[in-house]
Structure formats: C-alpha cells, structure tokens
Amino acid sequence: MNSTTLRLRMESLTVLGNLRHTEVFAAYADTIAALYEKPAVFCQKYAHLCRFHYRNQDLGKLFAAEIHYDSNVLTQNIDASLPEYIRTAADFDLYTINTLISLSGADILDFARKAFPKCSDLLDTLPGFPAGTPLPFGNCDGLRQMYRKRGSGYFARANAFTVIDGQIQPIAKPDPIRLTDLKGYAVQKKQIRDNTLALLNGKNANNIFLYGDKGCGKSSTVKAIANEYADRGLKIIELPMSQIHMFPSVCARIAESPFHFILFLDDLTFTAEDERFIALKAFIEGGVAGKPHNMAIYATSNRRHIIRENFADRGSDEVHRTDAIQSASSLADRFGIKITFINPVKNEYLSIVDQLAEDYGVVLPQDKLHMLAESFAVRKNGRSPRTARQFIMHQLALENDEAEDAKSE
C-alpha cells in the first residue's frame, strides 16, 4: 500500500473513528501527512513518532488497548445482529490499523525517499524502529468476541477508580488485598460476598452499609471483595466525600458500561446540616433516574447513623428529639443491608494473631506470642484486626533486626 492510499484510508475510519483522537494514531497520522509537506516538517514528525515508539515500545499492543477501551457501534450492539455494511466497515478499519502497525521506521523512510528524492542521503541516517505486534483480532467477528469476553469502554482501563476534581480516574496501583488476608468476621464477609455475587449474576443486589469500630477491616473488606471478583468484570469506584456532588454523573457513566460496579463511599461522617448529607440521601433513592442496575453502593462509617450527634441535637422537647433521631437514621436506612464490625474479644483477637503469624512466618511459642500480642494491644488502645496486623509487622521488623545483628557479629 502506498502512502497516499494509506493516508486516505486513515481519514476514512468509521466504526473505529474514535481512534483518531488517540495519541498513538495521531503520531502516525501526523508523520504520514508530513510526507506532503516540506522535508523539515516530515523530519520533525518522524522524530516525534520515533520518540513515541521508544517510550511505549510495542505500538501494536497500544493500538489493541485503545480499541479495547473504545465505545462504538459494535460495543453498543454487542449481542445484536449487525448489517453487513457495518461488518465490512469494521473490517476496513481493522485492516487499516494493522497496516499502520506493520510499518517499521524503515518502511516510513522508504515513503519519504519517494516524497523527497533530493534528501535521500539525510534520510539514510535517520533512526528507525521495528513493526508492532499485529492486532489479536483481524476482523469484525474477532473484535466482537473480544468485547464480549473482556468488556469495552473507559472502564476497561482498570479495575479500580477514584473521582478527582470531578473526573473519574483509574488508580494505577490499587490496594491488592484479598479476602484471605483478612482474618475473622466470616459472617460479615459472607453477607458481602453473597450480595456481590447477586450483583454479578444480574439479580437484585442491595446497597450495603458497613459500620462499627475502627480498625476492624470495613474498608479493607470492600476492597478485597472488589479484587476477588475483578476477573468477572467487577469494578470499584471510590467517591470521596468532597466529590459527593458527582454522584449523579458517576451513576450515568456506570449505567452506560457493560461492567458491574461497587460505588465505594468510605468513612462517611456528616453533620445533620451538611449539604452533602442532604444531597446524598436524595441521590441514593430519591433521584428521578434511579440507581443503575449494574451498581451497588457500599458505604463504611464508624457511626451507626452516619451523622455526628451532640447533646443539643437531642433537645429537651420530644418533637425535636424525634426529628433529630429520624434525621440521623434517614441515610443509613437507605441501605438494604447493614453489617456491624465490632472489636474482637480476647480469644478472637489472639486467633487473628495466630493466623497472621502463620501467614508471615513469625515463629514464637504460642504463649509468648499471645503475651506479646496482648501487651501490644494495651499500648495501642485495644484489640482489633488492625492492631493484630501491626503487631505481626512489629515482630517481623524485630526478627529482621536480630538477623542483621547476628550477621554483623
């Protein structure tokens, strides 16, 4: 294929037309277009393509990722029968992209020698790069199969997201915690797992409110559940309190996605007059649009009624007191499942210590391990799974220090 034909094909993308807005496509398109400019312009654009390639390595894999993240007529009709003309258009686009990927630096410089015959000596000295890996889907059927298996759109970019300044952003390195890392609380974990499986299976799933003592693993359990079922298309979006106003727009984005979502509201605490408290109550159940079928809200708080209550809120008259109590419970009542996490009693705490010690290879006689763990809990103001984990980390650090001292003697 000559450069003119390739340029026209690149301008004619339809089904995958969104690729024109990606950086990788622009790097190729600008270079091919520069063949019809002055030699200096071509050299500038080609140098940019080289730098882009060196930074990203295999541009074929990058193109495949951008197609995976795309939303197009194929993703919008994933199981529907498609007209032949759309299938042909998709095949045209995929062939064009594969042609681009197959070009090495030497191939593009061959185009340039024909476009700028007087500059051949200079072009011979320019650096190059290898061709990329071909797309793993060569035609419309292959691409649709990939979309069915792996999903599509913006949320295919990651498994965990957060909202920053009104924008949903992928989390590059989410907490990798798994349910096996969390000891105890089997009943609570089962409730959350069962509800999450209902969500993934397209059944009615409840919003869940996890409340109780700090350090018991409420937030960690939510993140672990998300990690546990990420391979089944479960995504988690953390919505910070400062971004509560983004609730409707986040739900709108979720409703358009083929994935299933946990919308994570962590450590909720409001005052009764807080505008965010009032807005969140309306958003969860009072909104006109309603909650997306592919989303469940998992919220955590150290307070059963979420809002801070003081003596003034209780009031001296019965009417005021009743209003205060109803306001305090009104948000929590919008969650179909409420799960309590309380600090473990002594035997439960020591059982968690034993399990963590086994996981991390801490070798101590059990009576000594328990004595040290209890002493550590006293200094840390109480028993909790977090205290147990901190104790084990402390013991590991001591063992490492002792091992280093032994080496130096």
Image (spheres, rainbow, N blue to C red):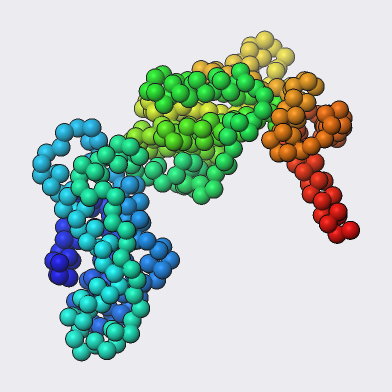
- Residue 376 shown left or right of residue 325 in the figure: right
Q: Residue furthest right?
A: 409
Quadrant of residue 2 in the image?
bottom left
Vertical placement of 326 versus 17: above or below? Answer: above
Residue at point 39% right, 28% down? 294
Q: Residue furthest top?
A: 318
Vertical placement of 382 versus 59: above or below? Answer: above
Quadrant of residue 115 in the image?
bottom left
| Residue 92 visible, this orientation | yes
Residue at point 80% right, 41% down? 395
Q: As rendered, which of 268 and 407 lies closer to the eye? A: 407
Q: Quadrant of the N terminus?
A: bottom left
| Residue 279 visible, this orientation | no
Quadrant of residue 47 in the image?
bottom left
Vertical placement of 156 versus 181: above or below? Answer: below
Residue at point 26% right, 48% down? 137
Vertical placement of 41 versus 166: above or below? Answer: below
Question: What percent of the width, then of the height, locates residue 29?
Answer: 25, 66
Question: What percent of the width, then of the height, locates residue 262?
Answer: 48, 31
- Residue 158 shown left or right of residue 339 in the figure: left
